[in-house]
Image: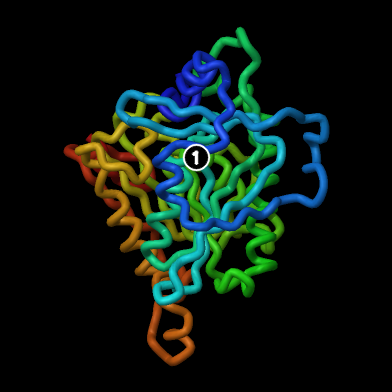
Amino acid sequence: MLLRASGLLVFVIIFSLGSASCSGGSSATQAAIVHPELIRLWPGRPPGTEDWAGPEQEADAELPNVGKIHVITNVTIPTLTVFRAPAGLANGTGVIVVPGGAFRALPWDLDGTETARWLMQHGITAFVLKYRVRPPPVGVPGDRTFDDFVRRTTAARAVAVADAEQAVGLVRRRSKEFAIQPNRIGMIGFSAGAMTAVIAATAQDSFRRPNFTASLYGAYLGNSDPSNAGPLFIVAAQDDLEVDVTKSVDLFTRWTRAKLPAEIHIYERGGHGFAFRAHGLPADHWPDAFEAWLAKRGYLTRTDRKRQGTATARPNSFVGSADVHAHTKREVSFGMSRLNIG
């Protein structure tokens, strides 16, 4: 059921391959990597999973409507892989990338390195988060409903959020080393990674909270009040069979009710797990909208130019109302807002 494209179906393929451990990775992954830096997230054993053991497992998978992806699971030592923006293009913004995978695996190239490559091309230094995940026990059935998924992943989500918040604090503490500004640290998550990123966006500790967040086909599964969260960019597709599109609408509504800036893009077709890959569907255009949103909020403006007096938008300014953009056919009322989602 849930996250079939980037999660549960992956495991069927992984175990059919014998849970192969591939030290080299896929060619797609290798092509996206340009001398990355690897940083261990926690000193010593990560808290709460001290008994987790065993080597990471990797495999390639071919998924319908997504294509070939490289999957990593049994992550016991979480890390950040740093992809620095080119010196002549770097703008002082950093973004932590949180892959999806149903809290069981990480689509490393689809959600991770391909996202990092797009961010680098836009002057943003990317930090791909390899957070702690474990494969499902053999013989355990998949989730039948979204509520099943929520119940099953309670402990796994807490671990993922702890890693995400730790990543924000680490990047902010070492921001000068990475040539980014401590108030220009964002987070983008996909599916389960989006659920993780949105919870991290509501962290009580501001030092461990991103300045802005992007949620791709995610949902809000946290308990915290979002009143202190930063701007939120939301993308989903109406034909998503894994995470109902109304979960993204609910997320937008929560930010709106808290009088926080939010922008939502709902596409008629795109399915689940499209990320930055083009599939000849309406959702292919979301990166253009994301680029415009980043530019509007000042995150694509070089900080050295800003110091020289170039005018730029305040990254966390609230313009008074949430932005709604629609890319479909008919208009339906959703309480506070009207969205075109036909």
Q: Is residue 89 above or below residue 252?
A: below
Identify residue type, mark 1. Trp
User: In the depicted view, which residue is nearer to us: 15 or 208?
Assistant: 15
Q: Quadrant of the N terminus?
A: top left
311 over 129 or under it: above or below: below
Residue 206 in sight: yes
Q: Left or right? Give the position of 220 relative to 320.
A: right
Residue holding disc 1:
108
Graded by Cα atoms within 10 Å as few (under 14), some (14 to 19) or many (20 or more), the crowding at tag 1 reads many
Residue 136 location in percent, x, y? Answer: 62, 19
**Colour option used:** rainbow
**Residue 228, image x and y in percent?**
60, 59
Q: Name the residue: 42% across, 53% down.
A: 233
The residue at the far front in this view is 24
Badge count: 1
Q: Please, what secondary structure does the residue beneath circle 1 have? A: helix
